Image (tube, rainbow, N blue to C red):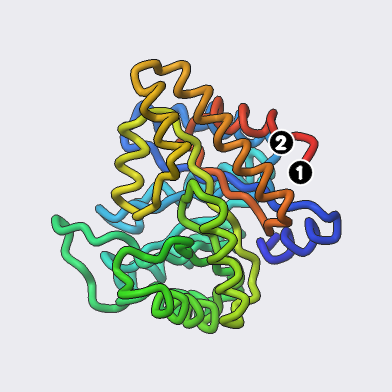
């Protein structure tokens, strides 16, 4: 089932889409145990699960597709496979697309990817919009794209960022997943700008539950999300108490999601960090809302 159909079905039900993101573990032992993680996550009944795609190594040997096949075939949940293009060429990505067709996987999240100075960049694709267009030319795929409620770090201004996002949608992106944010008002302002710009595809809100201070500071530096004062107070008060920070972080994420659902968000995408405990706590907190 394509993600577009999932959004249409949930809209008829008057409910938002709920999805998770996971990543292929780097350590071989963790990769062997991925089934235990997948089983617990799929038991929470997400509408789909996205699987991230590494920037290094060979695209053909990437574990992303194998994990996506497990999600679909073993657990009956639709996967979205992330594809990045800065460090891969058309030929490599063409092989991946062939694997996805053969596996019956229809959904792809097309990303430019982060620049890695240790890995040579290919010249086939410069922007995610070009990757979206290429994927659409290679088969009947649903293609999702990323968006930044607080503006992409490399964009000169918000107007340019929205203009580039419109290019991505015009190239064929059917659905957008936002980068993490901690201020819902920033997301609402961004959502309004997308509609003014004529971007009318579903926009899913990306939520990062906080489990430790170092994790969140690293992510904020990567994506440029701002930390509201009330969130900073939580970090400062509980940074040396692991259990208390976990509880406070879960409560903050749940409150964000409750507010988003009350404001009729299209969907909520939870960055699980491969932690079923995090996803489970959040689902318990919103079980009667979705």
- Mark 2 residue element: helix
Residue at left 69%, top 66%? 4
Image position of 78 (left or right of 231): right
Kindly indicate whether the residue at mark 1 contacts the one at mark 2 (C-beta within 8 angstroms). yes
Coordinates of residue 63 in the picture (x, y in percent):
40, 46
Q: Nearer the viewer, residue 239 or 11?
A: 239
Coordinates of residue 119 in the picture (x, y in percent):
17, 59
Point out the residue furthest to the right here.
Answer: 13
Q: Nearer the viewer, residue 204 or 83?
A: 204
Image position of 280 (left or right of 96): right
Q: Is residue 187 above or below residue 133?
A: above
Q: Nearer the viewer, residue 137 or 171?
A: 171
Residue at left 41%, top 42%? 24
Look at mark 1 in the image and give the residue it sits on: 290
Q: Is residue 8 above or below residue 45?
A: below
Look at mark 2 in the image and give the residue it sits on: 286
Residue at left 26%, top 65%? 87
Coordinates of residue 57 in the picture (x, y in percent):
25, 53
């Amino acid at each position: 089932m394509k993600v577009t159909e999932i959004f249409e079905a949930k809209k008829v039900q008057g409910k938002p889409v709920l999805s998770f993101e996971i990543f292929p573990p780097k350590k071989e032992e963790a990769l062997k145990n991925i089934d235990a993680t997948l089983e617990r996550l799929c038991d929470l009944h997400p509408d789909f699960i996205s699987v991230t795609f590494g920037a290094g190594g060979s695209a053909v040997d990437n574990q992303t597709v194998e994990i996506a096949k497990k999600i679909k075939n073993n657990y009956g949940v639709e996967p979205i496979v992330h594809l990045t293009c800065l460090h891969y060429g058309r030929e490599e990505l063409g092989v991946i697309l062939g694997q996805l067709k053969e596996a019956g996987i229809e959904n792809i999240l097309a990303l430019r990817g982060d620049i890695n100075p240790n890995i040579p960049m290919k010249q086939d694709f410069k922007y995610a919009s070009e990757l979206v267009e290429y994927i659409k030319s290679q088969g009947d795929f649903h293609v999702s794209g990323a968006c930044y409620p607080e503006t992409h770090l490399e964009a000169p201004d918000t107007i340019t960022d929205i203009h580039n996002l419109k290019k991505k949608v015009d190239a064929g992106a059917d659905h957008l997943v936002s980068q993490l944010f901690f201020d819902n008002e920033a997301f609402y302002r961004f959502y309004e700008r997308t509609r003014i710009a004529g971007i009318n595809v579903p926009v899913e809100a990306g939520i990062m539950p906080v489990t430790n201070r170092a994790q969140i500071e690293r992510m904020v530096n990567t994506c440029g999300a701002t930390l509201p004062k009330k969130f900073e107070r939580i970090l400062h008060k509980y940074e040396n108490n692991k259990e208390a920070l976990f509880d406070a972080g879960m409560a903050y994420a749940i409150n964000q999601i409750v507010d988003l659902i009350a404001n009729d968000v299209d969907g909520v995408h939870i960055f699980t960090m491969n932690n079923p405990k995090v996803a489970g706590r959040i689902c318990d907190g919103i079980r009667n809302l979705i």
